[in-house]
Image (spheres, rainbow, N blue to C red):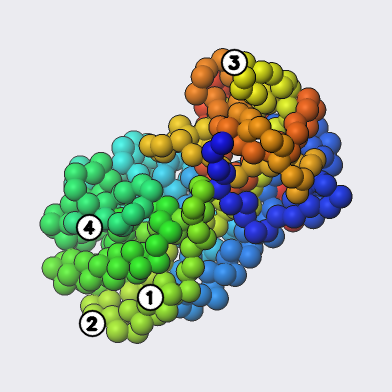
Amino acid sequence: MKPMGPIPPWFGGEEGMLLVGGCGAASLVDEAGDTPLFAYDMGIVDAQVRRFRDAMPDALHLHYAIKANPYAPLLAHMVGQVDGFDIASGGEMDMALAAGMAPDRISFAGPGKRDDELRAAIFAGVTINLESEGEGRRALAAAAQVGKTPRLAVRVNPNFDLKGSGMRMGGGAKPFGVDAERAAMLARAMIDGGADWRGWHIFAGSQNLDPLAIIETQAATIALAARLSDTVGAAPPLVNLGGGFGLAYFPGDERLDIRPIGVALDSALETLPDILQGSAFAIELGRWLVGEAGVYLTRVIDVKVSQGETFVVVDGGLHHQLAASGNFGTVVRRNYPMAVANRFGAAPAGDPVTVVGCLCTPIDRLGEKVALPPVAEGDLIAIFLAGAYGASASPTMFLGHPSPRELLLG
């Protein structure tokens, strides 16, 4: 038997049925028309935003990294909840603008921006986080072509990373950002080239559950931003401190306590170096804001036994929930929290089962040797922490199965 991660504390049941946003899972499936279904409870997202605002300094901006979940109704909701959107493609820019986010509150990061993306972003008034000297040169050329002053920030590859992070975005050789020792030179060149310099984007890592590691990295980030700005000889309008706030996906994980992070950051912003006294600061978060709000509901098609092992076969799979299958940035496969939605709270059966998807590949495993109540054909399996990096981060076209339905609650 292999343990599962903890079910987020937001969820409960009524008469044996899992409730999502106050609605029974089965009724949500009826409303959507079928399974598989992603259901997103905006009440949880709003609570996370309040949790952030309560813990962090009042002046700190909150940005939503829309790559976590770009579902259009969710984006429209987030426009009123956060101070900006962070995007990573021209397609995401179109989504952000369509949702109603003001262009000057959108920042565009990511290596490999095409010339047409640069032109579109500059024309719209979106801030571009430059990832290289070559991108800076192409951005100035694109600005000349569209006749607009470009809003340009510099993404820095710092000489440190976020210790213990699930995904390290800084430190050492990286395709992301400009190495710290060259970042000031690029910023100066953009200013001299006529750009509207918007500051620094310094993202050291993500998916971290250690408050002390995040505090340490934020302090190092502020110090680096000050040194670079002194070298440039100009105060940055904005310092994006990156993100890093993680979720408790796996067995043994504990939910991140962000209160000490806020206390430390409040102190740091009260004692800023002179060159940063007039700068704004932002944190960009994706999964931490929306991940716990999502539940993936998939129906049991078959229950079969092979060589003494019981397999629960569902109509979903890794083509919708790649991360839960362990094939999205996970070195060792571990079980996301899951439950039988229509027997929520029931005691597990004696023997563990392995929950597999409908794809013809052995890697399509959503839960390996997990303890569940007795499972039968037609039951609903709920996989939690499905609000981030679900449908849009999975190979939905693989093997021609239908795309999942999505439903916004609240």
Q: CA distance from mark 1 to mark 4?
A: 18 Å
Say which amino acid is labelled 2.
Asp
Q: Is residue 402 visible?
A: no
Indicate whether 228 appears above or below 275.
Answer: above
Label 4: how many Cα within 10 Å (few below 14, some 14–19, many 20+): some
Q: Position of residue 260 (x, y in %)?
A: 43, 75
Which numbered disc flags the more N-terminal residue, 1 or 2? Answer: 1
Q: Are marks 1 and 4 in contact (CB under 8 Å)?
A: no
Left or right: 395 in relation to 107: right
What amino acid type is highlighted by mark number 4? Phe
Q: CA distance from mark 2 to mark 4?
A: 23 Å
For residue 47, what is the image quadrant? bottom right
Is the residue marked by circle 1 packed among few (<14), some (14-19), or many (20+) residues within 10 Å?
many
Mark seen at residue 265: 1
Alpha carbon separation for disc pair 1 and 2: 17 Å
Rounded to the nearest angstrom, the CA distance separating label 3 from label 1 is 55 Å
Q: Amino acid at mark 3?
A: Gln
Residue beneath label 4, please? Answer: 160
Q: Which residue is mark 3?
A: 307
Secondary structure under the numbered disc 4 in the rendered image = loop
Please report contact status of discs 3 and 4: CB closer than 8 Å, yes or no.
Answer: no
Residue under pointer 2:
274
**Residue occupying the point 22% across, 57% down:** 160
Q: Which mark is residue 212?
A: none
Question: Mark 3 vs mark 4: which is more N-terminal?
Answer: 4
- In the figure, residue 315 lies in which quadrant? top right
Q: Earlier in the sequence, mark 3 or mark 1?
A: 1
Q: CA distance from mark 2 to mark 3?
A: 69 Å
Find numbered disc 3 in the image and state the secondary structure of the residue it sits on. loop
Residues at circles 1 and 2 in contact by the CB criterion of under 8 Å: no
CB atoms of marks 2 and 4 within 8 Å: no
